[in-house]
């Protein structure tokens, strides 16, 4: 099974706090967590850690952060043929305030406008493709050349590139924020009709399989009927990268021919385990952990 992830790579610096700092105050934290991040990069890391043959296509600068990202991807055996490290450019960096009391995170990302991926054609032959909208041209090219390959879009926010890729993928997986912003409707997870209305709008516009992620509530889609696929209950300390990890796990399971229901259930579990740990790639669980949880919750017999 071969995976290809195209998109965003960043260097994450996470500052854990027990309450969100007030504006115009000085605050001290006892530690910080540094690791690679970015939606497609995190997904590729998970898939490789789970022993998939996976390539990552994205761009960093040839600087300290860029070299650190490169080394982290090498350690799990990711194919870096289409990974660009551009001299004279600064790697994208994300600064994350993680409120460990409630498990929320606030992210500030710095990306230079001139940091652009330069390779329009990727010749890697995948069995499953994941794109996050960061690199539109190569993503479009790969999806159009591989129309019968299982593909996943991580639609975190509404932007032109995401909208252009939406109808090209097998599974359009969007965040609650994307769903509400795009449709100008509000989700109430206690009212299934608010979700089904948004689902139908997305289905009509993008004409593909729609999944809406709902953070700790799980995710929503249409199986035999409209349905919230619930997550498991955990004590969250840092939700950084949880969505990326969900997407990577879903791509792994759907690519390995698990049913759609099982793929979503196990992706929920993977994301839930990740929020109990600090950092993005640091929090990726092992495949054995996820499968064991799946058995404990009756998903896998």
Image (cartoon, rainbow, N blue to C red):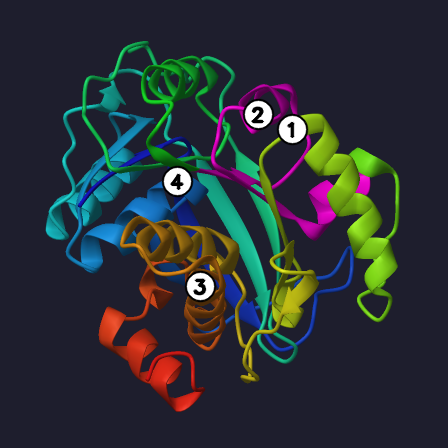
Q: Which residue does the numbered mark 1 point to in the structure image?
A: 206
Q: Which residue does the numbered mark 4 point to in the structure image?
A: 40
Q: Are marks 3 and 2 in contact (CB under 8 Å)?
A: no
The span from disc 1 to disc 2 (Cα, nearest Å) is: 5 Å
Residue range of the region highlighted in magenta in the rendering: 152-181
Closest to the camera, between mark 3 and mark 2, is 2
Residue in view at x 54 percent, y 84 percent? 234
Q: Is residue 12 above or below residue 192?
A: above
Q: Which residue does the numbered mark 3 point to in the structure image?
A: 267
Q: Which residue does the numbered mark 2 point to in the structure image?
A: 167
Crowd around label 1: few <14 · some 14–19 · many ≥20 (10 Å): some
Q: Are marks 1 and 2 in contact (CB under 8 Å)?
A: yes
Closest to the camera, between mark 3 and mark 4, is 3
Q: Are marks 1 and 3 in contact (CB under 8 Å)?
A: no
Q: Is residue 8 above or below residue 1?
A: above
Image coordinates of residue 265 in percent, x first then y, are 48, 69
**Mark 3 vs mark 4: which is more N-terminal?**
4
| Quarter of the figure with the N terminus | top left
Secondary structure found at label 2 = loop
Secondary structure found at label 4 = helix
Q: Nearer the viewer, residue 59 or 126?
A: 126
**Mark 1 vs mark 4: which is more N-terminal?**
4
Crowd around label 3: few <14 · some 14–19 · many ≥20 (10 Å): many
The span from disc 1 to disc 4 (Cα, nearest Å) is: 21 Å
């Amino acid at each position: 099974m071969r995976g290809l992830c195209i998109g965003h790579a960043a260097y994450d610096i996470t500052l854990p706090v027990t309450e969100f700092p007030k504006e115009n105050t000085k605050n001290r934290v006892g530690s910080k967590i540094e690791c690679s991040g970015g939606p497609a990069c995190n997904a590729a890391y998970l898939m490789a850690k789970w022993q998939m043959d996976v390539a990552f296509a994205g761009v960093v600068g040839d600087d300290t952060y860029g070299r650190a990202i490169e080394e982290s991807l090498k350690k799990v055996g990711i194919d870096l043929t289409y990974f660009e490290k551009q001299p004279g450019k600064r790697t994208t960096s994300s600064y994350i305030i993680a409120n460990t009391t409630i498990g929320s995170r606030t992210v500030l990302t710095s990306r230079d406008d001139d940091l652009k991926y330069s390779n329009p054609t990727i010749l890697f032959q995948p069995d499953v493709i994941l794109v996050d909208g960061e690199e539109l041209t190569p993503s479009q090219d790969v999806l159009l050349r591989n129309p019968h390959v299982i593909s996943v879009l991580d639609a975190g926010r509404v932007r032109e590139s995401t909208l252009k890729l939406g109808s090209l993928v097998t599974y359009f997986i969007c965040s609650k924020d994307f769903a509400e912003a795009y449709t100008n409707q509000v989700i109430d997870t206690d009212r299934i009709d608010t979700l089904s209305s948004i689902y139908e709008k997305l289905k009509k516009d993008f004409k593909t399989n729609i999944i809406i992620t709902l953070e700790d509530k799980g995710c929503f889609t249409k199986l035999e009927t409209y349905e919230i696929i619930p997550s498991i209950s955990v004590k969250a300390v840092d939700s950084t990268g949880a969505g990326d990890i969900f997407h990577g796990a879903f791509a792994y399971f759907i690519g390995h021919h698990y049913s759609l229901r099982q793929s979503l259930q196990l992706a929920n579990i993977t994301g839930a385990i990740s929020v109990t740990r600090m950092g993005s790639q640091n929090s990726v669980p092992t495949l054995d952990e996820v499968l064991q949880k799946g058995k404990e919750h009756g998903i896998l017999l």
